[in-house]
Image (cartoon, rainbow, N blue to C red):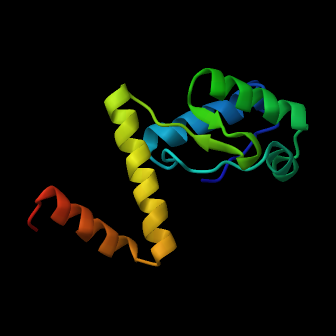
């Protein structure tokens, strides 16, 4: 997902960034487990001060839209109730494992469909 800041907008840059990340989560363009750029990298890419990006990330974390995992970085958080969050985390772990095994996405989906008993 491409994040863009409009310097002519009356909306402050940190709020533009925050809103775009939230919209990306709502539309599915950003999925649980997706890694966000570092504060410095995103600030550089968007021509913003690092403090501006850091503020947006802090507010997104307070709203539980993202989670920071120390030196690993910031990621889109699991959303919904506890059961839904656990399912999202399991899906992220599964996807990461399938990538590590070198399986193409369609094959990984076929495995899930079979495990769920879905005949297609």
Q: Residue at x 71, y 27 (%)?
A: 15
102 vs 44, nearest the viewer: 102
Q: Is residue 16 above or below residue 44?
A: above
What is the count of numbered marks?
Answer: 0
Residue 25 place in picture, x, y as percent: 50, 40
Residue 101 place in picture, x, y as percent: 46, 75
Q: Residue at x 73, y 25 (%)?
A: 11
Q: Is residue 118 above or below residue 65?
A: below
Farthest residue, direction right = 49
Q: Residue at x 19, y 61 (%)?
A: 115
Q: Is residue 84 above or below residue 44?
A: above
Residue 69 placement: quadrant? top right
Residue 56 place in picture, x, y as percent: 73, 29
User: Taking 68 as reference, is 25 left or right?
Assistant: left
10 vs 89, nearest the viewer: 89
53 vs 108, nearest the viewer: 108
Q: Residue at x 65, y 53 (%)?
A: 2
Residue 24 place in picture, x, y as percent: 53, 42
User: Taking 23 as reference, is 117 left or right?
Assistant: left
Quarter of the picture containing the C terminus is bottom left
């Amino acid at each position: 997902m491409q994040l863009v800041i409009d310097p002519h907008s009356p909306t402050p840059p940190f709020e533009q960034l925050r809103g775009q990340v939230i919209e990306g989560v709502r539309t599915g363009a950003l999925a649980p487990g997706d890694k966000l750029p570092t504060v410095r990298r995103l600030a550089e890419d968007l021509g913003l001060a690092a403090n501006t990006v850091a503020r947006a990330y802090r507010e997104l974390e307070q709203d539980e839209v993202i989670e920071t995992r120390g030196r690993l970085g910031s990621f889109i958080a699991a959303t919904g109730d506890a059961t839904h969050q656990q399912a999202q985390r399991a899906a992220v772990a599964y996807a990461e494992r399938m990538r590590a095994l070198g399986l193409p996405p369609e094959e990984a989906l076929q495995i899930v469909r079979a495990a769920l008993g879905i005949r297609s």
